[in-house]
Amino acid sequence: MLMQISLRLAELLSSRLCHDLVTPIGAINTGLELFQEAVPNVSKESEEILNLIQQSAQTASARASFFRVAFGSNGERVSLDEARQLIDNYFLRSKMVFEWKEPFQKDLTLVRWGRLLLNAVLWMSECAPRGGTLEISTPSQENLTLSLNLKASSIILHQGTLEAIEGKSSIEELTPRTISCFLIHFLIKENKWSYTLSNVQASSELKLEIKA
């Protein structure tokens, strides 16, 4: 019970923080677009500076929107298409390549599966800091299975991440890097799902599969 209360408080805090950040970040993007329209003939140096600011603002907005669903109370019901858009925007300028396998039922909304997908993708992307390819098979109405297969030249399993997924970490041992792994474990346990994590010792491939 105490764990659920703590998680609920964390969800609400994340939602509030991300919500309050998205609006001003969006205003920066809008302001930059209006400025570029009002002053079309700017120097090359000024244009580069404006583009850098705009890209940074877009990245911040994408991250706040992603975290709002992954960690906040908005993540309980999100469609697969919404989750995919959040992922595509978050990793727009990253070295990660995503391959979404068919069938992909974009309008399908399954309780907690969208949040699970976001946290799983976030964790696995951090395992490949140099980039890689992440194959994703999403759940369907007929088959409630989420499968992620990461292929990269170098895969790093950071300290504490596997322990958090396996439920072997205490709350006191959690870190910002392992919180996504803890949420993956929590969602699996709460919903009585099962998971397999394979090739964890391999240097170039890592696979996570979750079934209802």
Image (cartoon, rainbow, N blue to C red):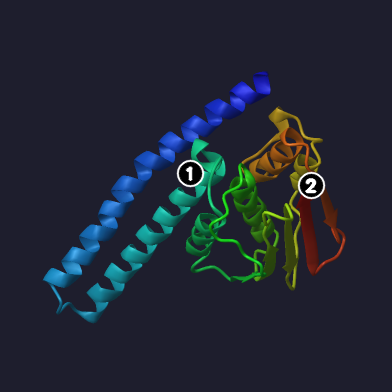
Task: Read off the residue under disc 2.
Answer: 162
Residue found at the very far top of the displayed protein: 2
Seen at 46% across and 37% down, the residue is 15
Of 8 and 125, which appears nearest the observer?
8
Left or right side of 81 for 167: right
Residue 159: x and y in percent read 76, 47
Q: Earlier in the sequence, mark 2 or mark 1?
A: 1
Seen at 79% across and 69% down, the residue is 204
Q: Give the answer, above or below, for where 81 lies relative to 96.
A: above
Q: Residues within 10 Å of mark 2 (few under 14, many from 20)?
A: some
Of 89 and 41, which appears nearest the observer?
89
Number of the front mark, 2 or 1: 1
Mark 2 → mark 1, Cα distance in angstroms: 24 Å
Mark 1 lies on a secondary structure that is helix
Residue 207: x and y in percent read 79, 61
Q: Which mark is residue 85?
A: none
Residue 166 occupies which quadrant of the picture?
top right
Residue 28 occupies which quadrant of the picture?
bottom left
Left or right side of 199 for 113: left
